[in-house]
Structure formats: structure tokens, C-alpha cells
Amino acid sequence: MGAPDGAPFPADWTIETATLIADGLGGKVWQVVRADGAMAVVKQASAAGRDDALRGGDFLRWRDGRGAVRLLDQRGDLSLLEHVAGGDLLSQLDTLGDDAATRIAADVLRLLHAPSPAPWPQSLQPLPDYFASLFARARLDREAGRHSLFAEAAKRADALLADQRDVRALHGDIHHENIMRGPRGWLAIDPKGLIGDPAYDFANLFYNPLERDDLRADPGRARRMAAILAEASGREPGVILDFGFCHACLSASWHVEDGNHDEAARSLGVAEALRAAGLRP
């Protein structure tokens, strides 16, 4: 069956109506109603987002609803997902406050990191491979004699990845807009599907919300977040800050690759704020 705009939904998904709610670099997203009246979400990955979508689908199938939305079915670049209608964490940030929102995100990650009865999927990407862009950018800077944040972060990331603790499956992209509230509580959406040190899964929270620059204006926010996340993860605040710093530089390296120098500069600004908050020696 096709949606009004021609989306190729499988007939056995029995989709009666579909409303396009997002169309970006990662692909398209529809809110749909099925023949039995149940609501769901359909995502169609773009060519650029296909690998992430497939790994993310494997992660969701493996979690089977524990801390994350349920993957109901997947056909190639199309994913049929549980509908969560309560809004995302970003929409409630001002009401909840920053510290409470950070604790909610930490609670979701605890659920996601909890053991599963099945082994994690073999398709998930190891963290050292995920950091390839940062290592490549740092190498270019070193060869050019530049003492850059990329080179500093790559050295720190190398040490972190050589000393990973309690390696397990990771979401890989936790932030305020990827945490949704529904009848089953707060749940994660849109995982990348990684394997590595669970402390990395907290790193992206420092980088968000995207439209706010609290971190650069107030390094104390990073210290407060690190204290909350350290308590939730059982790791030292310095380790959480280190991963946050490395992630911000990794994000900057992706933006440089894409030619988005304004966003790269913003990412490096976040990295500098995290460094000012107190990285480990």
C-alpha cells in the first residue's frame, strides 16, 4: 500500500493513513494509523543513513522494548516502530529543569545498558571504528604541524579506548530529542548501535540541547552534569568529561568533512567548555 505521497509501505503493515512528520539527511519519518486503529511510526532511511538505520534496528530488536521503543518490523530501508506520543525530553526541559532532565537521561541509559538475555548483535560498530574521523583529522593536523583540539582529543580518545571498562552494546546518540515519554515511561529512539565503554553513551548529552549554549556560558553546568552522570554510571566525573570532550571533537571532525564549518566551530566550543570544566590530567 502506498501513502498519499507515494511511500512504499508493505501491504501487510496495513497502513491506512500516513502523515509525513520529518524529512532530513537521515531519511523520512511518518506517523501512521494501521487498519486496527493502532498508531505507529515508519522511518525510511536515506542512502547516507542506511547503515546507521540497520545497526539501530538490530539494537532495538535486541533490546525488545527494554529502555527503548519497540521495532515492530523492518524491511530494507523501512522500519515500523512503536508510537510514543508523550513528547520528547527537550519539550519538557524548561518545566523539568536541567538537572532533572539529566537524571531522566541517565535513568534511560541505565535501562539501555541493563543485561539482555540474548547476546548483542554482531552488526554493532566498535567505538574505535566510530572514532575514525577524529583520528584521521588529528593525523592531518599533526602532519601539518598544527597543535589542534583534534590532535589533543585523538590522544585522549586513544587512551580511553585502550582502557574501556565493562564493554557492552551502546545506543550511541542519546540526547534530549531522542528520549520520548509514553505509556511505558521514558524511552530512547534512533540508536546508532555501537559497542564499547558505556561511559561514552553519556557524552552526547553535554553537546545538547543544540539550540542552547549554556555549556560555553557556564562551565559549571558541565561539572553539575558530570556529577549526576557519574553517580548514575558508577564512573568518575573526569571520565565522563573526557568522553564528552572527545565526542565534541569527533562531532566537529564530521562537520569539517561535510564542509559545515560553523557547526564544527560550535562543536569545538563545546569541547573547550568541557576542557575548562576539568578534564583529567
Image: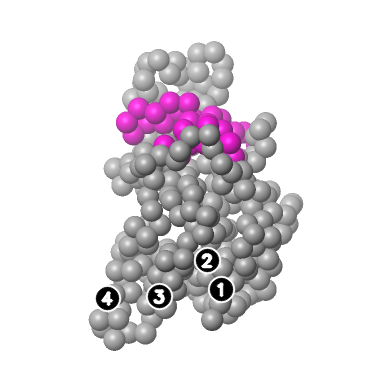
Asked if the residues shown at circle 3 and circle 2 are in contact, with their CB atoms under 8 angstroms apart, the answer is no
Cα–Cα span, label 3 and label 1: 16 Å
SS label for mark 3: helix
Closest to the observer, 209 or 134: 134
Asked if the residues shown at circle 4 and circle 2 are in contact, with their CB atoms under 8 angstroms apart, the answer is no
> From the viewer's perspective, is 205 left or right of 5?
right
Above or below, 232 relative to 152: above
Q: Quadrant of the C terminus?
A: bottom right
Q: Residue at x 72, y 55 (%)?
A: 100
Callout 3 crowding tier (Cα within 10 Å): few <14, some 14–19, many ≥20: some
User: Could you tell me if residue 19 is visible in this image?
Assistant: no
Q: Tag 2 or tag 4, which sits nearer the N-term? A: 4
SS label for mark 4: helix
Please state which amino acid type lies under the numbered disc 3. Lys
Callout 1 crowding tier (Cα within 10 Å): few <14, some 14–19, many ≥20: many
Please state which amino acid type lies under the numbered disc 4. Leu
Q: Tag 1 or tag 2, which sits nearer the N-term? A: 2
Asked if the residues shown at circle 2 and circle 1 are in contact, with their CB atoms under 8 angstroms apart, the answer is yes
Cα–Cα span, label 4 and label 2: 22 Å
Cα–Cα span, label 3 and label 2: 14 Å
Closest to the observer, 98 or 192: 192
Cα–Cα span, label 3 and label 4: 14 Å
Above or below, 275 relative to 172: below
Q: Residue at x 61, y 63 (%)?
A: 235
Q: Which residues are magenta?
A: 58-87
SS label for mark 1: helix
Which residue position is annotated with label 2? 244
